[in-house]
Image (cartoon, helix red, strand yellow):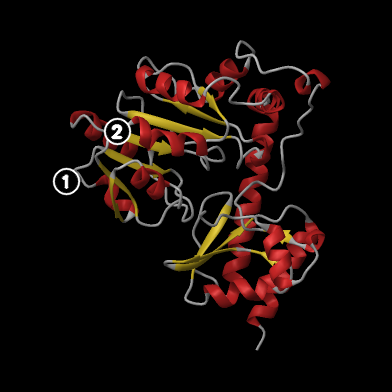
Amino acid sequence: MLEHGGRLREAARQWNIPLADWLDLSTGIAPWSYPVQISADAWQRLPEDDDALVASAAAYYRHACHHTSPLPLPLPGSQAAIQWLPRLIAPGRVVLPANTYGEYAPAWRAAGHQVSTVPFAALLDKTLDAEVIMLANPNNPTGDCFAAAALAALANQQAQRGGWLIIDAAFGDAQPVQLPSSSSVILLHSLGKFFGLAGARVGFCCAPPTLQNALAAALGPWALANPSRQAAMQALSDTTWQAAQRQRLAEASTRLSGLLRQHELPNCIGGTLFCYAPTAQAATLHAHFAQRGILLRRFDHPPAVRFGLPGNASDWQRLEAALSEWNAP
C-alpha cells in the first residue's frame, strides 16, 4: 500500500491531536466541494447507464471525445483505469516521469511491463523508445505541465511508432489544456480534485473503442454507484459554479504561493490546487506543521512538501501562524 495524502486518523494517532482539530492541506483536493443534492431513489435503485451521465461528461470533456474514441467511460475513480490499463495493454516498455504519482509504476510492473523514468521535460525527447508513455498533466505532485502543442506532438510521435500516450488530467480542470485527439491517446479524468468530490470516486476514460470496451468489461456492471452518478451529472453540467470555482482557486493559489515566498519558501512550484516546495528540510517542516495540527504532504525522494489550499479565513490564519513560527529566530 503506497502512501497518499489525507490519512488524518493516522496523523491524529501519531501526533496525539484529536481528529476534529486537524487542518488537512495534504491532498490537493479543492477545499470547496460542489454542493451535491442526492435524491432518495439514488440509494434504492441499481445504477442505470442510460441516464445523462455520459452525455454530461462528453459535453464537459469536449476535447476528449473524437472520431477514434467512444463516449467517456465512467469509472469508480480514475484509479480504476490506472490499475486496469496495464493489464489490458500487451507487456512492453513504459516510460514515466521520475517524480510523479506513485501508483503508476507499481501497476505497470505488476502487469509485466518494463518501466523506466525520465525527468518530466525529457518525455518530449523524440529518441524515447517506449510502447507506453504515461504522464499526469499537470504532474502530481510537482505541477509541471505541457502545453497543448507539446502534447499533440508527443501523441503524433507515439502514433507513428504504434505506441500509446496516456494522459492523466486529474488536476487539469482548474486550468484546462487542450488535450490531443489521436488513436494513440488514452485520457483519464477525475471529479475528485477540482470539484472537491474525491469521496464520490468518479472518473472517466476516453480511449479507442477496442481498449475502452475491454476496460468496461473488466470493470463489470454497476461500476459507479447511483449517488456518485447523480453528483457527477450535477457538477459537470453546472457551468456557473465551474467558472466561480476556477476564479476562487486562482485567487487562493496566488495567495498561497505569495505567502510561502514571504516565509522563506521561495522555490514553490505547482498547479492551481497546490504548491510543491522542494526542500532539504522536508521532514522537519512536515513535523513542525503536524505538531500544530496541520497536515502537509511529505515526499522523501526528492525531499519536498506540498501545501494544499486553505478553505476559509481561520484556516489561512492557522497556516500563516505556523509559517511565522517556522521562521522565528
Q: Relative to 239, is 98 on the left or the right?
A: left
Task: Identify the residue at horizontal 65%, vertical 56% (top origin).
Answer: 7
Question: In the structure shown, which secondary structural element does the residue marked by tag 2 occupy?
Answer: strand
Q: Position of residue 183 (x, y in %)?
A: 31, 23
Q: Position of residue 289 (x, y in %)?
A: 67, 71
Label 1 vs label 2, nearer the camera? 2
Q: Which residue is mark 2?
A: 164
Mark nearer the N terminus (1 vs 2): 1
The answer to whether residue 63 is seen in the rendering is no
Seen in the picture, residue 280 relative to 117 is either above or below; the reply is below
Task: Identify the residue at horizontal 42%, vertical 31% (top origin).
Answer: 187
Q: Relative to 126, is 81 on the left or the right?
A: right
Under mark 1, the amino acid is Thr
C-alpha distance separating marks 1 and 2: 15 Å
Q: Which residue is mark 1?
A: 127
Please, which residue is most extreme toward the top here? 50
**Total numbered badges shown on the rendered structure:** 2
Seen in the picture, residue 287 relative to 143 is either above or below; the reply is below
Q: Position of residue 2 (x, y in %)?
A: 51, 55
User: Would you call the spot at circle 2 few (<14 residues within 10 Å), some (14-19), or many (20 or more)?
Assistant: many
Under mark 2, the amino acid is Trp
Question: In the structure shown, which secondary structural element does the residue marked by tag 1 occupy?
Answer: loop
The answer to whether the residues at label 1 and label 2 have Cβ atoms under 8 Å apart is: no
